[in-house]
Image (cartoon, rainbow, N blue to C red):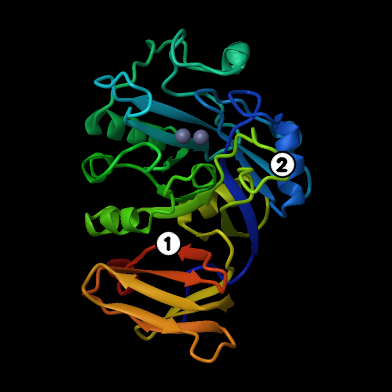
């Protein structure tokens, strides 16, 4: 029986799952971010200002949904030179619209940019002591797991910009997803399109999704190619634009990440995975084994579909679609143990 890995029904909603506004160190107000992203064809923005969870329900309308979240940075205290400081950045997005109590709150530390001005708007559990951040795998794993338990969708951000590599990111467990693309970092020249990091983590046993996001701060001129909005996004397939439908789709992995190409359909049937997409020059399928699949446009007319074998012993697969302009879209990874046991 054909299984739709991106659900058959519903609609695709274009989402920016990581952004900054005047509530922390961004240049645009939350309403200006909404207007900008609506003009770029987005339906969803997760407001993830640094260190401060401020809901923006007032921005919701029939065509736009504001998710609430925040981003936390945990810096390596061993290092005092800002240019080489290692750091771990995590976004937390509330899965329920009512979930506006900020975990990991410290009454005095960590806020920067405009965030201190909004301190009084933060709702936190007053019975808890101030949360002190610790830069090590165990402490960061504990944060990720606690955030999940408290109802947040957890993403690990921009490994390259953070100067983190294999030993660090492999020690973090509990994320739902990591940033395959971070537009803001790409716009600054960092290599934050990270397919290798994804395969490292998948081969290392992590069952995680991959997203694309802008992490926009909007400080550069809007007409400059370095403007950090519209670089990469997440296409969410959901029943509707209601808060809980969108976050359910996130938790269920009903999405793909892109910086251009579109994926229309992803199905699995009789040991074959099939992807249908916008005009591509190349479509590849990667597994956690020494075998890969590739289709190339041999005629110049473009390719719009590809099928690849998948076997129970091949751990997982994920597909990358490359358009004529070199831009890519990446599916989530799908695991053999789930594909063949349902
Ligand atoms: Zn960050
Ligand atoms: Zn950020």
Which of the pair 194/248 is nearer the observer? 194
Label 1 beta carbon within 8 A of ligand 1: no
Judged left or right of residue 248, residue 132 is: left
Residue under label 1? 332
* Residue 245 location (% of width, % of height): 60, 51
Residue 198, image quadrant: bottom left
Residue 243, compared with residue 142, is above or below; it is below
At a point 37% along the width and 36% down the height, the residue shown is: 162
* Residue 25 location (% of width, % of height): 59, 25
Spatial CA distance of label 1 from label 2 is 31 Å
Residue 139, image quadrant: top left
Residue 51, compared with residue 244, is above or below; it is above
Mark 2 closeness class: few <14, some 14–19, many ≥20 residues within 10 Å: few
Residue 219, compared with residue 40, is above or below; it is above
At a point 46% along the width and 9% down the height, the residue shown is: 107
At a point 38% along the width and 80% down the height, the residue shown is: 294
Residue under label 2? 222
Whether residue 1 appears in this view of the structure is: no
Whether residue 247 appears in this view of the structure is: yes
Q: Classify the position of the C terminus by image quarter.
A: bottom left
Marker disc for residue 37: none
Q: Secondary structure at mark 1?
A: loop
* Residue 276 location (% of width, % of height): 54, 78
Q: Classify the position of the N terminus by image quarter.
A: bottom left
């Amino acid at each position: 029986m054909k299984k739709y890995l991106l659900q058959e029904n519903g609609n695709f909603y274009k989402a920016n799952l990581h952004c900054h506004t005047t509530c922390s160190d961004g240049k645009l107000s939350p309403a200006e971010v909404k207007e900008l992203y609506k003009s770029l064809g987005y339906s969803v923005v997760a407001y993830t200002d640094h260190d401060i969870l401020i809901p923006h329900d007032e921005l919701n309308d029939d065509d736009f949904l504001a998710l609430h979240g925040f981003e936390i940075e945990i810096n390596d205290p061993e290092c005092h030179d800002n240019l080489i400081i290692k750091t771990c950045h995590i976004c937390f997005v509330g899965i329920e619209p009512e979930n506006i109590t900020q975990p990991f709150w410290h009454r005095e530390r960590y806020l920067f940019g405009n965030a201190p001005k909004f301190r009084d708007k933060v709702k936190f559990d007053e019975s808890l002591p101030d949360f002190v951040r610790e830069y090590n795998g165990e402490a960061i794993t504990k944060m990720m797991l606690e955030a999940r338990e408290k109802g947040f969708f957890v993403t690990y951000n921009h490994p390259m910009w953070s100067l983190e590599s294999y030993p660090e990111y492999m020690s973090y467990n509990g994320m739902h997803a990591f940033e395959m693309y971070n537009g803001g970092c790409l716009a600054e020249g960092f290599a934050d399109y990270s397919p290798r990091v994804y395969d490292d983590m998948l081969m290392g046993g992590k069952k995680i999704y991959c997203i694309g996001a802008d992490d926009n701060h909007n400080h550069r001129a809007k007409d400059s190619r370095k403007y950090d909005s519209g670089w990469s996004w997440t296409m969410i397939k959901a029943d509707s634009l209601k808060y809980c439908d969108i976050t359910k789709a996130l938790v269920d992995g009903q999405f793909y990440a892109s910086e251009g190409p579109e994926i229309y359909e992803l199905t699995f049937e009789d040991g074959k995975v099939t992807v249908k997409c916008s005009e591509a020059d190349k479509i590849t399928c990667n597994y956690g084994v020494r075998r890969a699949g590739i289709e190339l446009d041999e005629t110049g007319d473009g390719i719009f579909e590809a099928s690849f074998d998948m076997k129970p012993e091949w751990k997982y697969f994920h597909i990358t679609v490359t358009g004529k302009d070199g831009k890519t879209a990446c599916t989530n990874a799908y695991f053999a143990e789930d594909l063949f046991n349902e």
